Image (cartoon, rainbow, N blue to C red):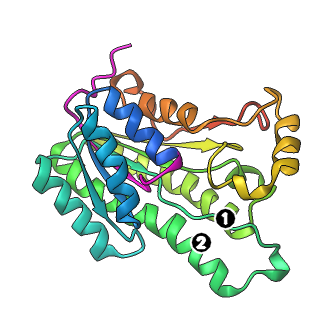
Amino acid sequence: METGLRGKVVLITGAGGGIGRACAIEFGQEGARLVLSDVNLTAAQAVADEQVAQGVEAIAVQTEVTSAESVQEMINRTLSAFGQLDVLINNAGIFQSKPILEMTAADWDRVLEVNLRGVFLCGQAAFRVMMEQRSGKIVSLGSLAGQVGGIVAGANYAASKAGVICFTKSLAKQAGPYNINVNCVNPGVIDTAMTQPWGEERRSRMAADTPLRRLGTAAEVAKVIVFLASDAASFVHGAHVDINGGINMD
């Protein structure tokens, strides 16, 4: 399949590990040029160094996605380094699993701030650039929890991801006329550092409840994201793509 991604500039937030790092690997293999953003610059730089060692053009940028100023600096660094922005992968996020009765207002605010405000700020900033170019792709990370409510995830995490799904549809309606494709993916239970603290018993139970009888991998999510960012998905717009092994079918 010809993806048309060679030479394209791909900005990935939360690129320091997990699904973000897997996206960097997959986009790098497609010949894209990478801007790898993370609040943890050391982690982002490590992924950038991996990609540079593979012959990929890649830079690392420290970004706090809750800050409009920091997000704009990320965009400025992208344009300064590569002169364009073709793809945004809105991946940065945090996880919490507190029960509602144990959750503080500060817990609620912090997760919504990173997971939803961050997606809004990054999506808005990328939209401005892509609107001038009259082209672009934006893919955001929703979640199974945003569709069905938290299973292990806290209510704040689930609500933030439901917001991402709806924001994707709103952005798609406004960005479509400028030839900007906007979509999101909803991973189910994926074997990453986020799910490791759940413990083997809970992870095994989640795998048993999944029709494919296993957890997903970060690489499997990244491959779908690459497809959505590619020329092959040119008429996929405003969609949410489930990557959950069949644990939820709608």
The relative height of residue 245 versus residue 149 in the rendered view (above or below) is above
Residue sitting at x 63%, y 57%? 162
Residue indicated by mark 1 = 157
Q: Quadrant of residue 210?
A: top right
Horizontal side of residue 173 vs 112, given as left or right:
left
Query: Regarding mark 2 in the picture, which secondary structure is present there?
Result: helix
| Residue 219 visible somewhere in the drawing | yes
User: Which is nearer the N-term, disc 2 or disc 1?
Assistant: 2
Residue sitting at x 33%, y 15%? 2
Please report the bounds of the magenta region as a residue range. Answer: 1-18
The answer to whether mark 2 and mark 1 are in CB contact below 8 A is yes
Q: Main secondary structure of the magenta part?
A: loop
Q: Quadrant of the C terminus?
A: top right
Residue indicated by mark 2 = 111
Residue 106 percent location from the top left of the image: 63, 86
Marking on residue 75: none
Residue 20 percent location from the top left of the image: 46, 47
Horizontal side of residue 55 vs 62, given as left or right:
left
